[in-house]
Image (spheres, grey):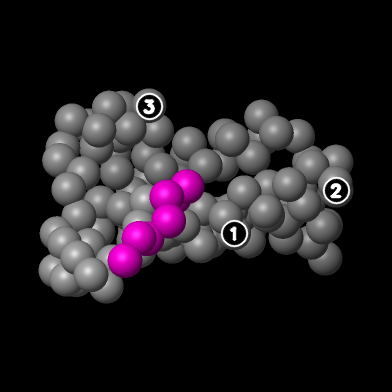
Amino acid sequence: MRTKEERFFEHLRKLSKDSYWILKQTRKMPKDRKAQIDGFMLAGQDLRVGYDEMKAVLEEVNYEVFGMSIEERKKEFSAETTFDEEEFRTPTFIRKPPKGKKLEI
């Protein structure tokens, strides 16, 4: 029978692998996926799972998907354009104003 910790790491591995594949395909991590991983890791800390152990799993899965470390991937991705064409396909009068600014008509 698997322990809670083993089941936790299995789920973290699956969750992160699915998320990293999305990131690899779209070059953008969906906010809900990032929040889900962060929340799951927070729950892991409540279960007394070490942060370094969780980070090691993320690093390992990232290497499986991208063939490089998280740090290397971040550098490579930040060198690419982060322009989101989809955002600008919406007409300006429909787009949401930037955070902290109100739309004036």
**Residue 26 in sight:** yes
Please report the residue visible at 18 percent of the width from the left and 30 percent of the height from the top. 79
Location of mark 3 (residue): 71
Q: Residue furthest front?
A: 105
**95 lies left or right of 55:** left
Q: 51 above or below 5?
A: above
Label 1 and label 3: CA atoms lie apart by 21 Å
Crowdedness near tag 2: few (<14), some (14–19) or many (≥20) residues, C-alpha within 10 Å: few
> Closer to the camera, 91 or 15?
91
Label 3 and label 2: CA atoms lie apart by 27 Å
Crowdedness near tag 3: few (<14), some (14–19) or many (≥20) residues, C-alpha within 10 Å: few
Please report the residue visible at 62 percent of the width from the left and 49 percent of the height from the top. 38
**32 lies left or right of 38:** left
Element carrying mark 2: loop
User: Depth-wise, is mark 1 or mark 3 nearer the camera?
Assistant: 1
Task: Check disc 2 and give the amino acid type.
Answer: Leu
Task: Check disc 3 and give the amino acid type.
Answer: Glu
Point out which mark residue 47 bears: 2
Location of mark 1 (residue): 36
Does residue 14 show up magenta in the picture? no
Stretch of the chain drawn in magenta:
99-105
Label 1 and label 2: CA atoms lie apart by 16 Å
Element carrying mark 1: helix
